[in-house]
Image (cartoon, helix red, strand yellow):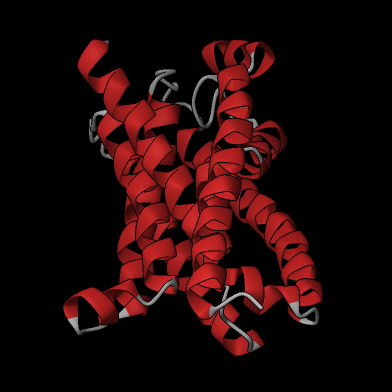
């Protein structure tokens, strides 16, 4: 009969193995689009040529941007992973929404220039942070627990700057800018709501299975691994481009 040491060793090996699998899959996905939030040719052409108020197109672009923005979604997965009550999910998602809405609008309207690679590195770090937090890393390593609500709000601010930098690449015209930004931000929220609904359905269904507790450590370890990889990709871009 295997002893506890053997079982623990196998568990560690399983975590490493599946984390590597997830890294390989994620790298394959990223290689298609290079980095998070890659803008397709049609969207790029529209943003470069648009004039005046274009509410519906910007609404659509915002929703699409969030749904395909896997760094934002990975952070949200980490945020809600251990939230069991609807009011807690609503509170944390609201904190995140306030954060990224403020800096998205303020960043573009005030023309605050931030290096896109450094901002996306911080966004990648937010994924690492949340995975580490879910694993109880702060209590184990530092014997303290940071305020999780403030952390979500602060990282939301950086996520908003990440959204702003993508729009700033296209030198959007002043005519209709505020309305178009509001439409884009509403689209982001709609995309976030749609993605969050799917994530919650999947996680809530998974929680009913014995495998949830068994693989929660693996999942958050993999979340940290992907976050580290995203950071590495962005820092590579920063130092080489």
Q: How many badges with numbers are in the image?
A: 0
Instruction: Please determine whether, in this image, residue 50 is positioned above or below residue 20.
Output: above
Instruction: Please determine whether, in this image, residue 74 is positioned above or below residue 84.
Output: above
Q: Viewed as shown, does residue 127 lie left or right of 47?
A: left
Q: Viewed as shown, does residue 159 lie left or right of 182?
A: left
Please name whichever residue, 110 or 155, is drawn nearer the observer in this view of the structure.
Answer: 155
Whole-percent x, y for residue 155 in the image? 34, 58
Q: What residue is shown at x 41% (from left), y 36% (from top)?
A: 229
Q: Residue furthest front?
A: 1
Please name whichever residue, 95 or 21, is drawn nearer the observer in this view of the structure.
Answer: 21
Quadrant (top left/top right/bottom left/bottom right) for the C terminus: top left
Whole-percent x, y for residue 28 in the image? 62, 25
Whole-percent x, y for residue 51 in the image? 56, 18
The answer to whether one can see residue 86 in this image is yes
Q: What residue is shown at x 30% (from left), y 45% (from top)?
A: 122
Whole-percent x, y for residue 55 in the image? 66, 38
Quadrant (top left/top right/bottom left/bottom right) for the N terminus: bottom right
Please name whichever residue, 139 or 241, is drawn nearer the observer in this view of the structure.
Answer: 139
Locate residue 152: give its quadrant.
bottom left
Q: What residue is shown at x 61% (from left), y 55% (from top)?
A: 189
Q: Residue furthest left?
A: 142
Please name whichever residue, 129 or 109, is drawn nearer the observer in this view of the structure.
Answer: 129
Instruction: Please determine whether, in this image, residue 192 is positioned above or below residue 6.
Output: above
The answer to whether one can see residue 103 in this image is no
């Amino acid at each position: 009969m295997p002893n506890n040491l053997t079982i623990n060793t196998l568990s560690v090996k399983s975590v490493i193995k599946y984390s590597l699998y997830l890294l390989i899959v994620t790298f394959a996905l990223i290689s298609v689009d290079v980095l998070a939030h890659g803008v397709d040719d049609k969207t790029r052409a529209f943003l470069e040529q648009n004039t005046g108020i274009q509410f519906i197109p910007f609404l659509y672009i915002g929703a699409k941007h969030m749904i395909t923005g896997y760094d934002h979604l990975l952070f949200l997965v980490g945020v809600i992973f251990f939230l069991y009550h609807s009011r807690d999910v609503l509170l944390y998602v609201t904190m995140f929404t306030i954060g990224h809405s403020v800096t998205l609008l303020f960043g573009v309207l005030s023309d605050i220039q931030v290096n896109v690679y450094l901002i996306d590195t911080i966004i990648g770090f937010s994924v690492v942070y949340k995975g580490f937090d879910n694993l109880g890393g702060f209590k184990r390593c530092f014997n303290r627990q940071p305020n999780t609500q403030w952390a979500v709000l602060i990282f939301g601010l950086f996520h908003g700057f990440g959204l702003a930098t993508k729009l700033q690449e296209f030198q959007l015209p002043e005519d209709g800018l505020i309305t178009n930004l509001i439409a884009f931000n509403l689209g982001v929220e709609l995309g976030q709501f749609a993605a969050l609904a799917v994530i919650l359905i999947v996680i809530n269904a998974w929680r009913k299975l014995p495998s949830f507790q068994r693989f929660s450590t693996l999942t958050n370890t993999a979340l940290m691994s992907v976050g580290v990889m995203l950071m590495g990709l962005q820092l590579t871009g920063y130092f080489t481009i």
